[in-house]
Image (cartoon, helix red, strand yellow):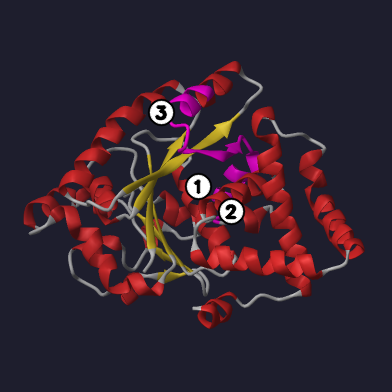
Amino acid sequence: MAKVVSFIIQKGGCGKTTTTANTAGYLAMHGFQVLAVDMDPQGNLTQHMGYDTESLDHSILDLFEGQYGFDEVILQRNETLHLLPNNLKTASAEFSLQKNSLNPDFLLRDVLAPVMNRYDYVLLDCPPAIGLFSINALAASTEFVLVVSPEFFPMKAIKPLYETFRMVKSKLNHSLQFNGIIMTMCDFRTRHSQEVRSILKKNFPHKLYNAYIRMNVSLKEASSYGQTIFEYNPHSFGAFDYQNFAEEFIRDHHKNICKKQYYQQKFETLSPGEQNQIIMFAEQSLSAFVKNGIDNADDDSSVLHEALVVERNKVLEKLFPYRMNNLVEDQS
């Protein structure tokens, strides 16, 4: 069964859509079956994935209203990444959905239930407000991630959202878990960004991701071209940061654990000279980032170590091709 994860904060402009799109793109690129769901009637995730919201034949609204089936609405961006699109028609139908549905808080849950075994991850891009569609996202999710930029208003939004989480967990979705907090749009040269991270560390010591997303022009450019950062500029800071986040995000997933163990075992079978050569290639891949430095000194070692392991495994993948699905099936 898929992990269903909401990326949420009741404030616009914090990077929810960018985080959803690039996390989905990275996971799909590495063999996970991913469904990205645009729960925001503004349709920003749909646009980020390269689709024109005004010319959609169908949208998630058709599923909520029972007009069409899942396979008629889904957009298959590639073999491993699918999208449930959205547009402004859904916003105009919010009142009627609330009024005419027997269980308006479970519209999304009921849509996803028949297809949960198709995917490893279902990632939900939530609207910047706590309303029908955000409640639906949380009611359908196994967990959620807070997306916080280092500014005053996103920080103020955390407490009421956490209260909403407690309400949803107690009344609608007992299994809902708070996964963690990802900081976006960071510039740790500023005191304010440093102070916000310190506050989050103090209040959520086990929930704040080590990875963080720095300000990066390529991230904005990628969205305007309808691409993930890994398609648009895989050598950018944005790609580096989202790779680190995605790897941390999936660290406990069974398939990911198997894959990392596989490459660790392969690495240990090599001679010291071969190991050093592979590490050298991995370090060269990181050099573009390392020479510019990591902005947050506190997290340097952990972030760079994880990034180096990822780059090392990319080299190993060329030497020892990994067939994720077959290997997992063989081990299970």
- SS for tag 3? helix
Q: Tag 1 or tag 2, which sits nearer the N-term?
A: 1
The residue at the point 82 percent across, 37 percent down is 291
The numbered dot on residue 154 is 3
- Of residue 16 and residue 295, the one placed in the foreground of this image is 295
Left or right, 250 with respect to 92, comes to right
Q: Which residue type carries mark 2?
A: Glu
Left or right, 195 with respect to 299, comes to left
Residues packed near mark 2 inside 10 Å, few (<14), some (14 to 19) or many (20 plus) = some
The residue at the point 37 percent across, 33 percent down is 11
- The x and y percentages for residue 200 are 47, 27
Q: Which residues are magenta?
A: 198-226
Q: Which residue is mark 1?
A: 19
- SS for tag 2? helix
**216 falls in the magenta region:** yes
**Viewer-nearest of discs 2 and 1:** 2
Q: CA distance from mark 1 to mark 3?
A: 15 Å
